[in-house]
Image (cartoon, coloured by chain):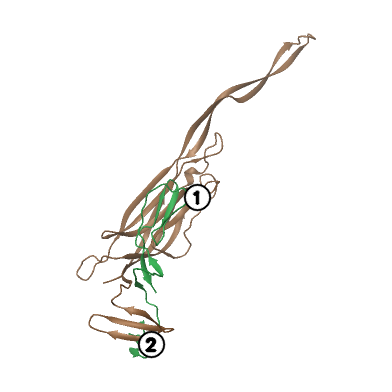
Chain colours: A green, B brown
Amino acid sequence: MAVVLSITPTRFQASGSKLDSQRRYIRKVASGADFKFVTGQNMDVAGGGLRYVDPDGNNNDDGVYSGSFTGAAGIGVKV
Amino acid sequence: MSGFTASNSRIQVVETVSSVDQTVFDTNDDMPHIVATTFLSGQTVDFSNLTQTQNFWFYDPCAFYYTYFVWQTHPFYGAYEAVQVTECTGAPLFEYSVDAREYSSETTIADLPVDEDGNVVDIDFVVVQATGVRTLAGKDPRFNQALPTTVPPKTFSFQGSVLLESSGKANGDSWLRRIMSVYKSGTKLKMKVQESTASLVRGAINAPFPYVSSSRSTYSFSLKVFFGKFRQ
């Protein structure tokens, strides 16, 4: 039978364990992110080359790219 | 210490691991969640054939040689004999280049989800789960082989953009890129298809690119789109 609500000194479970303190729920943080959600276009092409904007917002060009695309940094989340 | 607190405006769960309290769940944090999902089948992508230009290189005054014989009397022996004569004729020489091209096409593929009051939900991110197939494999204009594609044969997920095709010169420099992006724009979900081609010169005289008219590629995608927010 699913656990409706269980509170012990070392564990919390609710809603059939859909909420469980032993799981790692991710949440938005301003710093110290474990990884980032990309929020928009993060590649562009020009002059036969490619620009990739990484989740930190840094431009990574292939040495051929000749455009001026500006991508946005992703939203950081903590596990 | 592991714990659970609940109040009118907050639920918080803390897990203590190695004597360090770690927040597991906190309604005061912005927590990513999916607010809506939509399925978009039959999304087509079409990159048209590349083009090439014949460029004048130079005029060779002796591009072609030909020989013929003439009968004449030998100046010393007096014999009547056939003598081989070689002459040449000029011709213009050409080289060919794939034309540089920048192509971009943005289309609306869906409306953003709405809430129970009919108001558009201002989503924070989109996750796309794509299943696609290259329905026409364009050829590299130089070779009788398809342009390399990075689309896997099975379902793949991406956020933002994905590289579809690319090709390089002999020295490794990129000269062709084809990409696709899916993103939120205002109250719409957009798909942008882009191609960038640098001029590519063929290192041969009077020899056009043999497969330039077979360089068109097409794709068909089914997209499962997850619309996400960090806070209600």
How far apart marks 2 and 1 lie (CA) works out to: 54 Å
Horizontal and vertical percent for residue B71? 71, 13
Q: Amino acid at mark 1?
A: Ser
- The residue at the point 48 percent across, 33 percent down is B55
Task: Count numbered badges in the picture.
Answer: 2
In the rendered image of this protein, does residue A50 appear above or below residue B201?
Answer: below
Q: Amino acid at mark 2?
A: Arg
User: What is the secondary structure assignment of the residue under circle 1?
Assistant: strand
User: What is the secondary structure assignment of the residue under circle 2?
Assistant: loop
Horizontal and vertical percent for residue B121? 25, 66
Task: Identify the subunit bearing mark 1.
Answer: B
User: Which residue is nearer to you in this view: B92 or B41?
Assistant: B92
- Picture quadrant of residue B14: bottom left
Q: Quadrant of the C terminus of chain B?
A: bottom left
Task: Identify the subunit bearing mark 2.
Answer: A
Q: Residue furthest front?
A: B19
Q: Is residue A51 visible?
A: yes
Pointer 2 with pointer 1, Cβ within 8 A: no
Horizontal and vertical percent for residue A68? 37, 49
Pair 2/1: label in front: 2
- Picture quadrant of residue B62: top right
In the rendered image of this protein, does residue B221 appear above or below residue B66?
Answer: below
Q: Residues within 10 Å of mark 2 (few under 14, many from 20)?
A: some
Q: Quadrant of the N terminus of chain B?
A: bottom left
- The residue at the point 43 percent across, 60 percent down is B132
Horizontal and vertical percent for residue B15? 38, 83
Q: Which residue is mark 2?
A: A11
Left/right of residue A57 with respect to residue B61 in the rendered view: left
Left/right of residue A35 with respect to residue B114 in the rendered view: right
User: Which residue is nearer to you in this view: B91 or B28?
Assistant: B28
Residue B167 image label: 1
